[in-house]
Amino acid sequence: MNAAASGVASGPGDPGPRPRRYAFLGPEGTFTEAALLQVPGTDAAVRTPMGSVPAALAAVREGRVDAAVVPIENSVEGGVTATLDDVSFGAELRILREIVVPIRFVLVAPAGTELADVHAISTHTVAWAQIRRWVAQHLPDADYVPAPSTAASAVAMLDGAGGVSTEGLGYDAAVCSPVVVAQHPELHVLAGDIGDNTQAVTRFVLVARPDAPMPAPTGADKTSLVVPLWEDRPGALLDILEQFSTRGVNLTRIESRPTKAHLGDYFFSVDIDGHIQDDRVADALMGVRRICPRTRFLGSYPRADQRAVPVATHHSDAAFIQARSWVDNLKGQ
Amino acid sequence: MNAAASGVASGPGDPGPRPRRYAFLGPEGTFTEAALLQVPGTDAAVRTPMGSVPAALAAVREGRVDAAVVPIENSVEGGVTATLDDVSFGAELRILREIVVPIRFVLVAPAGTELADVHAISTHTVAWAQIRRWVAQHLPDADYVPAPSTAASAVAMLDGAGGVSTEGLGYDAAVCSPVVVAQHPELHVLAGDIGDNTQAVTRFVLVARPDAPMPAPTGADKTSLVVPLWEDRPGALLDILEQFSTRGVNLTRIESRPTKAHLGDYFFSVDIDGHIQDDRVADALMGVRRICPRTRFLGSYPRADQRAVPVATHHSDAAFIQARSWVDNLKGQ
Amino acid sequence: MNAAASGVASGPGDPGPRPRRYAFLGPEGTFTEAALLQVPGTDAAVRTPMGSVPAALAAVREGRVDAAVVPIENSVEGGVTATLDDVSFGAELRILREIVVPIRFVLVAPAGTELADVHAISTHTVAWAQIRRWVAQHLPDADYVPAPSTAASAVAMLDGAGGVSTEGLGYDAAVCSPVVVAQHPELHVLAGDIGDNTQAVTRFVLVARPDAPMPAPTGADKTSLVVPLWEDRPGALLDILEQFSTRGVNLTRIESRPTKAHLGDYFFSVDIDGHIQDDRVADALMGVRRICPRTRFLGSYPRADQRAVPVATHHSDAAFIQARSWVDNLKGQ
Amino acid sequence: MNAAASGVASGPGDPGPRPRRYAFLGPEGTFTEAALLQVPGTDAAVRTPMGSVPAALAAVREGRVDAAVVPIENSVEGGVTATLDDVSFGAELRILREIVVPIRFVLVAPAGTELADVHAISTHTVAWAQIRRWVAQHLPDADYVPAPSTAASAVAMLDGAGGVSTEGLGYDAAVCSPVVVAQHPELHVLAGDIGDNTQAVTRFVLVARPDAPMPAPTGADKTSLVVPLWEDRPGALLDILEQFSTRGVNLTRIESRPTKAHLGDYFFSVDIDGHIQDDRVADALMGVRRICPRTRFLGSYPRADQRAVPVATHHSDAAFIQARSWVDNLKGQ
């Protein structure tokens, strides 16, 4: 298995049979771990849950792990700002892969609990936001107890020896991902698939250091960028977008984020169709970089849906090669 | 005082001396209440704290209050998605005013507590994110206990009779806004202004029903829109932005949000310079609405910073009037 | 027959049965007269040949004729600058109709002349340019004698009494349009259809005073404009073109002409698809007029080819009406 | 003197002291010869007048001369279509230099002629068009006799032995350039500087074969292109212009010309600021060539007015170099 396929850099001085090390936004049982397990070879790897996105990415930067999986976008809640900001402002990193995971929620409790016994529910705020309708319908009077992750409240019921109890926890049931139940079958599922939006998915990214080998183009790729807007004037964003549109490069995601300097200063987190090895993408990146010299490249990697995007003849590699050789010939005269 | 100045509709059948009723994202003592109090006349109004942004906006829609103040954007954290989504998808509302409030955090505890006594701190997750550096420096080992608002953990220490205690709360100190301390001077301030970014501000909006009288143009105005992107193709967003740029209309904020239908479908929450009574803005809105027939108008209202934006001669009202009368004359021939 | 159908204003004080009066670029027998005869009702009208385009248009402006037919564009030679400049700089006029005439040339001489007898040929310079290949092949050694029109050299051979002679003319044969031969069958055709480009056509326009009733929209119309470029800077022309493209208005012709003030100052003579009564066209004209306040409208009239141009839904009149009423409602609040 | 300074290719196999050979649009005494004489070294060169622009350019293509000077644009009459079409459709050529010549007209006759004696005037049609106002004022009843060049009618009066006569010519006076008078002082000047527009200039170009060394960049350069429009659709021209505007490349001239195939098919003759050795120009050419693979490069050469055009930082060579090296580094990973 080559490095690109595994999604992780081995590096020239790799001693060989050392197992890969991955960080992920923990604790165990979160959707992030489910995403990590979709990366080939990770079942045999060392997988370290981290308490936060910044902690997971710091572990990558400091070389304590080879790569990390963190959430970047949820189809219901939108961009994961902790991730967007950290990859944009911290030391440079590279996205090697995207993983899309369906988001399902289950309500768990100690065996013997009935729905009618549930007066307080604990889970992460984001999960709570995504099950509001179900709660309003089935447990309208239940109190909400915030938790630091979607797995934490469920895991807190476990005594590590097969026992499950909510005693002293301040809640009677927890909302978590089915992954937790798969890992801890002693949890009793009171209700399954209780998410308001049954199509909900979260997109995760596998992130490594910038010296990781870039995944080869597959014909169905995506490139991620961070573009600090250069000026507050009519058309500044337009200038950037034109660099893409005049080369037929499609934008699949654009998200504005505050630079944190002062209100009204933004940077843009952008995904475009195509790979930096595609001429139209490389050319568009040059254009953007000229306008915004602090533009950051976050990586070119395969689209999770493997859907190839049609490219007009005059934006094809062949058209670029023909045009470049024409100009080069003329310049050589 | 006229309705536009108060920021709230009186309506034709207004009985007169009834006090205005306002909802705000509670509990009391939050930055949102501080924002509300900047609206003229609100000190004498009925002010009702609500448990969530949707609850506050529902109170407006159902006529239980005249208007509500909710946060919409933070200079550090970015857009407040609960607000952006609710005003975009729920029944139509109108923004009448924006209010910018500096965000300051204080650490409070019962009198007699020292920093060294603090082993666990409670506050809202967003506040916790904004004091990380101070905590790392002064209380690196403190545990974090999430709370539903920036005021809740502090208020929970109060017995209502002047007593302050953390007994049974699971934390030793709380982080809140100075507003809480102003209202409850019995709270002991362990450390003041502990936010990592001392320039941090949050922008709030005063929201009413669509029949509220629109604030008159001041020459330094802003217009808010919701634009569902019509198509996933190169240049779709560009087409929208061109409707603004060809009329010299500046974009002050653009935020993409998932439509929640499926990953990759976005709508855009947009603020532009100018008032719908300005010809260039009205003309741009027509252009956008043609392309995206589901475009939603959220209101034209004065900029909080009262800064007028220069307008080129050929985008002025005079240029529009001259051009329209020219075409109208020709069409009449 | 109504005025729009005849293409000419009758005017309120029209005494009635007076015949229409038309000027055309003469002399008789030119392609321009052929174009004029395609206008309904002109066979019964008074038709006055004029010595030049400016003379024909002056006759219109001064009320000596109701309208004039002048050439505006040739498929081989390009724009007719005398016409483009006169309608752009002189007192305002209106184009009521376009007429496309195939350009065919014949070589005529007195009866009895053989090709071998032809040592000098006379015709208008433009005609000479369009038969070069035929001449090079059949009469490579013939001298060229310039003439003021395509009919003049042929007509000069006639004695008015049925006689044809080249004596004292300095040439042996003339090149003219088949129209001359139809009118003067005593001319002997030495060679027919000798034009290098057998697809060549000339586009003529019927021009009247600005108070002439504008032709009603047919669904396959054209609008002509004169746009003085406002500034010599990157993108000035682009700004104008964007006013068309953002409304889906197609450009069918664009020609730059010197303003004659100094080298590098241009105005643009532009034809676009659609009628000023089409909302997208009226809106685009407003946009152009805002940017270039000296923009001149030359008329909306049916396309000679009657080909309707498809219009995207969001550029249709319905989309404009819907968007305008939306904005008007909002402004009325 | 190097080849670039002389404006003409010497070529590797140049035998040395052979004099340069130039063609120009003749006859002698035209403004074109005046333009040619501005090219350094041409006073000592072989100068051959040609009967037409195509003949002059054919002499270049066939190697009979080293270069030719032909008119390309007049500040009053606009583009010289014979030149625009020939360099666009014929075998490839290169423009090495532009020369701007003021256009002045004088009325000449045999000595002893008075204005009152002039009943017929002969000159080229273009010259006639440019002295209309003077003629209307001073000789309103004079007939016009067309001539093949601005020098021909004057030269025809000369007997080659110092005599001047109009006998048998059919006109009494001729309009020509002061160059003719300088060469033939026996011509009597009846009236000087009779042009309607005393600011009139004509721009000429020095044209050589494509293997001529390209003039080095001077910082105040111009590049000429021929761009066949790829498609008749809204925005096709816009796509081309955007390739220039997104790189800050200014258009100094754009002229549409019929392709001669059928009415409504155009190509564009375009001049832009800058030299193909400037990165922004080379990059824009690549973009245009991708869209229109039949785009033709006519040359980069110094502006006649030597006026340097300011370039924004993000369009400078430095910005291109920085951006290209950034992308190249990333692609190499």
Image (cartoon, coloured by chain):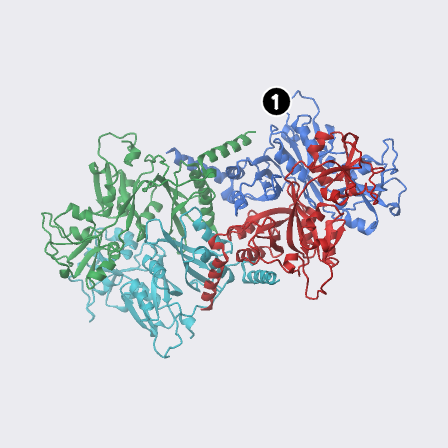
Chain colours: A blue, B red, C cyan, D green
C175 left or right, relative to B19: left
Reply above or below: C1 against D28. Answer: below
Displayed quadrant of residue A262: top right
Tell which of D139 and D294 is nearer to you: D139
C192 left or right, relative to B87: left
Residue C83 appears at what percent x and percent y?
33, 60
D83 left or right, relative to C278: left
Q: What residue type is labelled 1?
A: Pro
Q: In which quarter of the image is the N terminus of chain C?
A: bottom left
D66 left or right, relative to A161: left
**In this view, which residue lies farthest toward the right?**
A112
Displayed quadrant of residue D121: bottom left
Q: How crowded is mark 1: few (under 14 residues within 10 Å), some or many (20 or more)?
A: few
Residue B59: tell me if it is visible.
yes
Residue A206 appears at what percent x and percent y?
66, 34
Q: Element under label 1?
A: loop
- The residue drawn where x is 57% and y is 35% is A296
Residue receiving disc 1: A12
Name the chain under label 1. Answer: A
- The residue drawn where x is 79% and y is 46% is A194
Q: Quadrant of the C terminus of chain C?
A: bottom right
Residue C305 appears at what percent x and percent y?
43, 62
Tell which of C270 and B306 is nearer to you: B306
Tell which of B185 and D124 is nearer to you: B185
Residue C308: tell me if it is visible.
no
Question: How many numbered badges does the structure rendering display?
Answer: 1
Displayed quadrant of residue C32: bottom left
